[in-house]
Amino acid sequence: MIVLIGFMGAGKSTVGARLAARLDLDFVDSDIVLARRLGCTIAEYFAAQGEAAFRAVEQETITGLLRGPDVVLALGGGALGSAAVRAGIAGHDVVYLDASLPQILARVGADPARPLLATGDVGELYAGRLPTYAQAATVRVDADGDLDAVTQAILDALTVRGATSRAAQDTAAATAPPAPDTPDQEAASPEPERAPDTSPRAVFVGPPGAGTSTVGRLVAQRLGLPWCDVDDLLAAQAGKSPGEVLVDDGEQEYRRAERAAARRALVRPGIVVLGGGAVMNDEIAQALGDLAVVFLDVTIAHAAPRVGFDGNPGLVVLHPRRVWTMQMARRRPRYLQVATWTVDTGGRDADDVATHVAQLLQAGRA
Ligand code: S3P
């Protein structure tokens, strides 16, 4: 789910509707759902029942929406005052529309539908809420300018490039991905370049036993970069391990959670490590299109002792070698398609591989 937050007048409703149209998702404005539920306008409810009563219904309504289907959801400007709402948005893509107070007053300063603009000191309210918005956000965009440009900035930050509708996504998925030796292939495309601090420096892919987590962490340490393992994000979001999500909630839910976690990870700087099957998801594979991707290649002979199939078989319990080999046969072409660099890890320890990859990344940046 994509949740839009920010002060009144930041443009959440306008941008939310445009964003949803671009992504072919439904748009839900919590204020509209609330007004329907209250049976009157928000201003009327405020006047009759007071703010505390309004906040209680608002919290219940929004936490319900957050448990619902995947949509673009705009929250009322005061909704993050509720700890339950703050907890409910954790794990979603939370986009903070950061508009300045003069811009906000110019947009909605005289709007009678917004009761809080008429009372007290708006400047104080604004200043008091900003840290909460900033803290809750996974993406922050300057929302003072043209709202079409704001919508585009969000799309870029969410790395849904080329996926402005499901139809476009399907078309793009059917076209050939970039060849491994042409990482700059998209340089001539009209797509805007992503801001440097919202792109990973490198993304690691590979099967179980390739060493993606170990090597990814070592490379991050050597280059002084932050690092993020998508499996950890998925686990934090689900409150249980990726394996448990798969077994308890089924493959479809697992893939949805994996896609959501990857979407969040792929706008982070530093080193990002994807789970072994993530590249088979077309949206994730597409998002890798213009990133530096390191495929750690390995054969079953070298992977088996690393994974410890004999001592701890994990998910591939019955025929671990056969399952690994079948999965690798399906996935290897995809790894090769998305890879900027392919590194053979057979017979090398993690330190050795990390040194090699760190050199590749440094050379590739020139
Ligand atoms: C409020 C913002 C409004 C609405 C209500 C209270 C606030 O939503 O929920 O008037 O406390 O900031 P918008 O942010 O959509 O204007």
Image (cartoon, helix red, strand yellow):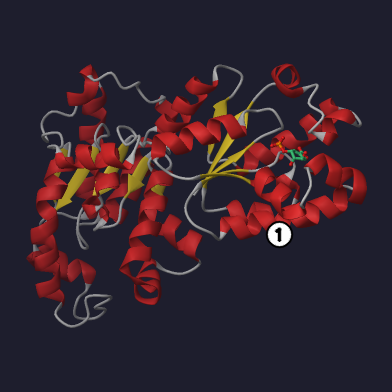
Element marked by disc 1? helix
Q: Amino acid at mark 1?
A: Glu
Q: Quadrant of residue 227?
A: top left
Please state if 341 lies on the left or on the right of 128 as rendered.
Answer: left
Residue nearer the viewer, 113 or 206 = 113
Which image quarter: residue 57?
bottom right
Badge 1 residue CB within 8 Å of ligand 1: no
Q: Is any part of residue 184 visible from this angle?
A: no
- Above or below for 145 versus 283: above
Number of numbered discs on residues: 1
Left or right of residue 26: residue 222: left
Tell me what residue is drawn at x 25 percent, y 33 percent: 361
- Residue drawn at 27 percent across, 34 percent down: 291
Q: Position of residue 292 (x, y in %)?
A: 25, 35
Q: Is residue 182 visible?
A: yes
The percent position of residue 242, horizontal first and vertical second, equals 38, 66
Specify the quarter for ligand 1. top right
- Residue 274 in picture, x, y percent from top left: 31, 51
Q: Give the residue number, with chain letter if any, for mark 1.
A: 60
Q: Nearer the viewer, residue 323 or 66?
A: 66
Q: Relative to 3, say whether 310 is above or below.
A: below
